[in-house]
Amino acid sequence: YKLSNLKEYIKFIRKKPDEIDILLQDLFINVTSFFRDRSSFDYLEKNIFPKLVKDKSPTNPLRIWVCACATGEEAYSIAISVVEFLGDNQSNITVQIFATDISELSIIKARNGEYGASELHNLEPAQIQRFFSKVDGSYRINKSIRDMCIFAPHNVFADPPYSRIDLISCCNLLIYLDNVLQNKILSIFHYSLIESGYLVLGRSETISSSPLFTHVNSNHKIYLKKKNTSAKATLYRHLSFPIHNNSQNQAAPNSVIAFDELNKVFDSFLLSSFVPACVVINQQSDILQFRGETSFFLRPSQGKASLNILKMIHPDLTFDLRTAILKSIKSKQAFTQKGIEMKKGNTVYLITIQVVPLKGHFDEPFFAVMFTEDPAAENLPITKTGKKANDAKDQKIKKLEELLASSKSDMQLIFEVQKSANEELQSANEEVVSSNEELQSINEELETSKEEIESINEELLTTNQELQTRNEQLSESYGYIDAVLSTIHEPFIVLDKNIRVRSANRAFYKKFQTSEKHIEGMYFFDISDQQWNLASLRELLLDIIPTNSFLNNFEVSGMFPGSGQRKFLLNAHRINQKNFREHLIFLAFEDITEREIQIQKQTDISFKKIADSAPVMLWVTNANGMITFLNRAWIDFTGLNINEDKKRTERIHTEDISLFLTTYNSAVQLRKEYTVEFRLSNQQGQYHWMSERAIPKFSVDGNFEGFIGSCVDINDMKEHEQRKEDFIRMASHELKTPITTIRGYVELMLDVEDSENLFVKSSLKTVHKQIEKLSKLIGDLLDMTKIETSAFHLNNEFFDMDAHIKDVVEETKQLYSEHAIIFQHEDKCTVYADKDRITQVIINLLTNAAKYSPGKKEIIVAVKCDEEKVTVSVKDFGIGISKIDQARIFERFYRSHEKYEKTFPGFGIGLFIASEIIKLHSGKIWVESEKNKGSVFYFELPLRKN
Ligand code: ADP
């Protein structure tokens, strides 16, 4: 404010009272954080909470007061700590945490319960995840914890305290207070706590030898309330809240202060004159103070102890003293009575009594009573009554004296009577006093109850304030939600448990051209001309409330009034309602029609781009077989455009056209994919081999929409293949003649060779065996080329399959000398087949069975037949075939890629030829196998009836 000194600032404050609040806020010390002293919390969880919750129940809550809670971290930490401590037991115990602070600004922040990430550094990640939720970059305390805490602005010295509290946490407030205030606050806490309640202070705070609290753990500064009723009595004197500072209380004399002042005044009075035997009495003549040597005049009276001066005074002085006191009281002046005779032993003393009202600010008058001895009368001998005196004067004096004596004794008598009356009055008075005391104690009890009521009242006020804040927050949230919902463009609807419409938003009414009165209370599946009445949707929606499931992007498309053909994504989830109110369903509709069209356009463009850049020729037809798309490669090759569809077939080689048409037509009919090879002529009239593959297209509802086809130019591949096959055929042919010649000669030599030359004989046998293998291989290669060129023909005849196989097994047994071949057969079955080719198949299977089961003994060959077919199987117990290989072993040149199997010699054409032979017989060949357990190869031939 550009003020140079304090005085100016004071002036400024006087002019601008708001500044006081700003200054006050500056003075508050808001240093706090979550779990400031983690070990203290551990101690509380381990040692204090178990004791506190022992007798708690939902109706008897655990009550905690966090005094000076600043921005709420301490209160939330305690709440978290209690929740963690309670664990599963949480539902059995209600927890109320009253968190108060003098600063209203701090309380606002605490109530909000929102903290930045840096403020949470003391919390463990798991605690953050469990007790906070992320909101716009900061973290908000979860509702379960927030609900336990009641925040209120509260001045601990001015507002009534809370009562019946189990635990008070007041960290780092005491250090800012002086001794008097510390004692006062401790009295307040003592009052608030239940018997055996605990007080937790900050690390650097201590209570040394307090009558109110004992140490529980000095390291963690935890204290236990002392069960001390006298302390409680003193406490009430400490408690003084504006609410009960009534006029009566203010007027009540503080007796301690009054007596102090009396002492001072009295002493100064004595000092200013002399210190004779004197006392201070009140208006009732009760002695309050003694000074000097009073025993000469006063002694304790008999009977009930009393400090009444008239009871204690020497009887000779009673009358005059009473008169003096009365006079002084009346006149409010000092009164002196001189020359009063006091008989003590044989001596009569002359005594002066002086009663002086004491001046001072007392609530009742006090008097100093002084006794002095007249020195002239000292040792005055007692007058002898038997003395002879004749003198009339003396006689008169004597008479007068006697009269005086008799009146004195009368007086004495009256005095005695008055005294006894007084005593009766006294006892009556005492009764009154005792009743008064009773009343007093009742009053005190009432006072206590009143204070408790005030505390409860304060608590109610706090709770009320809290509720008010919550209410405001709630209506704010409602407003917020209303604003959000009304601005949402997507339609939504709320359904009850019977799937009837509760409400919908503006966007819904607009989109589906309906209104509140048309749909409210209606069955959802009946609205919009039953557009939503789909079995699958019904099933899912009906499931949401009972199983708390979701509806996730459920697609619905159809014709909608006013908006035409549209597609929606439906999302729904359950709205949970508490307090036995029935659950609802929130159902949102996302119109994705435009987006889909856009995506479709994009996809079409991308597809066209990709298709045009592909080297493969691509085409697309519709359900009527009309071409709807041809890619660049197709147009470039044929020179035909999309409108010259008919000319497409004309470009196919005449030799291939019939195969193409049959394949294509049957694929269209069956709506199945197909692959076909044919020759197609290009713009220049040159034919190229093409491999065409086409797959059918279907709409979402399963309608056939034509084919997507691709044509790959395989001309080069075909030529290579042809050359390779020509070579193999030629090589096989060329090899066959020399091999046959060598074989003839070796057989001849075996026949003519002298049987004694064993080496030559065995060598010849080996050569013969190898030549056998070689010629089988060449035979296989020739067969393969025959199959390729379709020059493979069958010479069918009728024969008995079982007998034939038995013969083959018998004949070839010595070839598989390491194995025992078991032959199993049932009935005789005659087939019409090429006997040699079937032999070739069975030998192939037997050779494989022996080759791929080294070290295993058995091979089982079985023949089974029924009315329709004959099935031959060859079973081994060898290395087996993996699932992947099983699918491919009947392909040409296919050999297993597994390492172990590569060690077995072979070309991978045996099974190919076998399968081709069986196919030519309109039969079937297959394998069943398990790795490392063995394989069974089957082939099946149809039986010819008749
Ligand atoms: P090959 O001359 O390589 O044996 P085949 O066409 O007869 O050629 O067999 C093809 C492949 O099938 C073989 O390489 C082998 O991996 C597998 N195979 C055939 N018969 C058996 C069998 N009985 N047990 C295990 N694997 C076999």
Image: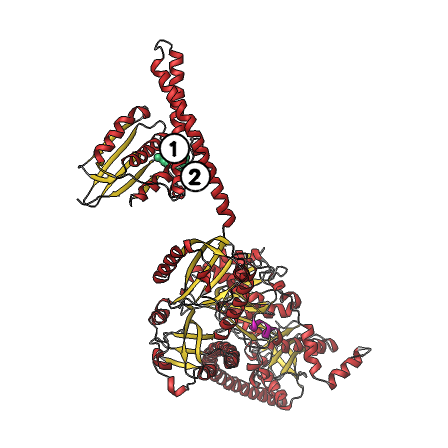
- Give the residue at x 41% y 57%: 657
Task: State whether the magenta stretch is mostly helix, strand or loop.
Answer: helix
Q: Quadrant of ligand 1?
A: top left
According to the picture, the residue beneath numbered tag 1 turns out to be 779
* Relative depth, front residue between 883 and 161: 883
For residue 36, above or below residue 786: below
Work out how far the residue at label 2 is from the one at label 1, CA to CA, in angstroms.
15 Å
Q: Quadrant of the C terminus?
A: top left
Secondary structure, mark 2, is loop
The answer to whether residue 171 shows anywhere in this view is yes
* Relative depth, front residue between 109 and 130: 130
Secondary structure, mark 1, is helix
Q: Position of residue 607 (x, y in %)?
A: 53, 64
Q: Position of residue 595 (x, y in %)?
A: 51, 72
Which range of residues does the magenta coloring cover?
Answer: 106-112
- Give the residue at x 41% y 28%: 737
Q: Position of residue 319 (x, y in %)?
A: 57, 84
- Residue 893 - label: 2
Q: Can you tell which quarter of the image residue 872 is in?
A: top left
* Relative depth, front residue between 316 and 40: 40
For residue 342, above or below residue 644: below
Q: Nearer the viewer, mark 2 or mark 1?
A: 1
Q: Is residue 790 left or right of residue 199?
A: left
Q: Is residue 105 left or right of residue 301?
A: right
Q: Position of residue 738 (x, y in %)?
A: 43, 26
Q: Label 2: how many residues lie within 10 Å, few (<14), some (14-19) or many (20+)?
A: some
Q: Quadrant of the N terminus?
A: bottom right
